[in-house]
Amino acid sequence: MRTPTRRSVLGAALAAAGTGLLAACSSDSMKGMDHSGMAGMNHGGASSPAAAPPAGFVTPDGPEVAAAEARRNPGPERKVALTATETTLDLGGRTVRSWAYGDRLPGQEIRAKAGETLAVSLANHLPQPTSLHWHGLALRNDMDGVPGLTQAAVKAGAAFDYRFALAHPGTYWLHPHSGVQQDRGLYAPLVVEDPQEPLRYDKEWVVVLDDWVDGVDGSTPDAVLAELARGMAGTDHSGHDMSNMPGMPGMPGMDMGGGSPSGPSSPGPSGPSRMLMGATSPLLGGDPGDVAYPFHLVNGRLATAPETFTAKPGDRVRIRLVNAGGDTAYRVALGGHELTVTHTDGFPVEQAATQALLLGMGERYDVLVTVKDGVFPLTALAEGKNASALAVLRTGGGAAPDASARPAELDGKLLTAAQLKADASVRLPARAPDRTIGLELTGGMAKADWGFNGRTYDPAQRYPVAAGERVRLEFRNSTSMWHPVHLHGHTFALGGDGPRKDTAVVLPGTTLAVDFDADNPGLWMVHCHNVYHAETGMMTVLGYQA
């Protein structure tokens, strides 16, 4: 069988975009759905054809995109092969069947240098189409990995070659943009090293945080999506004691080590209910999320079998923190230590000391820490969900901390992105916006009608921008939940001298204004990085005018 090339697959994507045809979507066909399938979907489960995309926008394979890539001066190639496959994963004494890149969780870390060209061959051995999105990178548009917008999904048994210049150093990661596949094991860190690295440190650790449901008591992310997509009105909780819901305080009948729950939440063909009820977080403005995950992981390991990082007392360590979760914010602290924040979302900030950090889904922070003598918990508290993940720092003798260790620093000084300032080297120059785009975050859990400006995702709808403009996005959250909003292909500034980021938390009842320079032509998604909010509609597109 002939394997499609990148060029033929992309050509098919653009042809499909030109016709605007979408397959009908039943409630069962939500499994593995790519984002092109969300257009026109109503919550009865049907999908109507989308209108043809409007003319007058730069296309992902347009000459403007090729010219922007040439200006990045692509350097020597760094070649990587990835295979997306069904596999068995060991979380540390608990095995699950899932999907991953190879047989690792997270996938093998990719390292390259700024100025190099990353050439990644993706082989799809999954039973569904998939894709690769390079979260946080300012890359060429036809490599952004959004099926139905910038490429066709990579079919089962096919392959796709991603190739693009790496313009900026930093901490990034990769994951599919196909349905809820990200909430399986399909993610990996991507570190773009700075050839002129100004920081000095003895060791470097990458710490990836994740909430886990796939393969536990029959659960899958697709079943979770189907449950949430019915909305609260379509879910009968009349027979459920909500204290028995996984992740709820007290949790009688629930073995957080992975045992089966008792009572009416007993597993069925698609697992127990995973809808989170009654939880709250003042830090997140109320409701912390929709999903009660049975496990929370650091680098793919349960807190009962944590990864151990070793160092010598006095070592200076750089920790790159990545939140790869689907629905969980993590409050992170290292027991007995202060953290010095150096970067957020890959870009340097004026260094600031803190005891704890809060990471929404998709966010990254780099910190420096001078390690003490002993054994210490690196704890990631699942904010508002009464659970945590754990890794261990060992520089000397002593017993390892318990899985439930909660260092005092978690309740100490906590920095948010709004308190940080961009390093002068990456500060966005002062300039009035040429265009302001208002994006109201709308919808709710009751009807699962998440969207922007009252509309669920339609790839044919684009908010126009023009090359060279300073663009302001005003996110107004009129919902009762927090949302980590993510912009593809760019970084934005939080305020005049605020940090450069690509993902930022918008709390309920607040407005967040961010500015970016329109310097990377194409069609770019803006979406909530709660994977279930995105898949039920909270996505839209910025389109560069041709």
Image: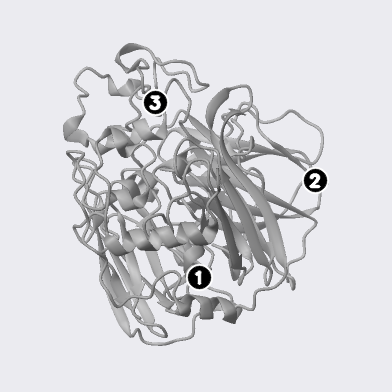
Which residue is more in the foreground, 330 or 363?
363
Name above or below for residue 259 compared with residue 417. Answer: above
Q: Earlier in the sequence, mark 2 or mark 3?
A: 3
Q: Amino acid at mark 1?
A: Pro
Question: What SS does tag 2 mark?
Answer: loop
Q: CA distance from mark 2 to mark 3?
A: 36 Å
Residue 302 shows in the view: yes
Q: Which mark is residue 47?
A: none
491 left or right, relative to 206: left
For the rendered model, the colour scheme is one colour
Location of residue 47 in the rendering, given as x and y in whole percent from the top left corner: 21, 46
Q: Quadrant of residue 238?
A: top left
The quarter of the rendered structure image containing the N terminus is: top right
Location of residue 215 in the rendering, given as x and y in whole percent from the top left corner: 48, 26
For the point 48% across and 70% down, the residue is 491
Q: Residue furthest front?
A: 1
For the point 43% across and 43% down, the residue is 326
Q: Residue furthest top?
A: 263
Which residue is more in the foreground, 272 or 151?
151
Location of residue 302 in the rendering, given as x and y in whole percent from the top left corner: 59, 30
Q: Earlier in the sequence, mark 2 or mark 1?
A: 2
Q: Which mark is residue 311?
A: 2
Q: Which mark is residue 246?
A: 3
Q: Earlier in the sequence, mark 1 or mark 3?
A: 3
The quarter of the rendered structure image containing the C terminus is: bottom left
For the point 41% across and 35% down, the residue is 385
Name above or below for residue 544 compared with residue 204. Answer: below
Q: What residue would you read off at disc 1?
A: 499
For the point 50% across and 30% down, the residue is 295
Q: Amino acid at mark 2?
A: Ala
Which residue is more in the foreground, 435 or 26?
26
Q: Amino acid at mark 3?
A: Pro
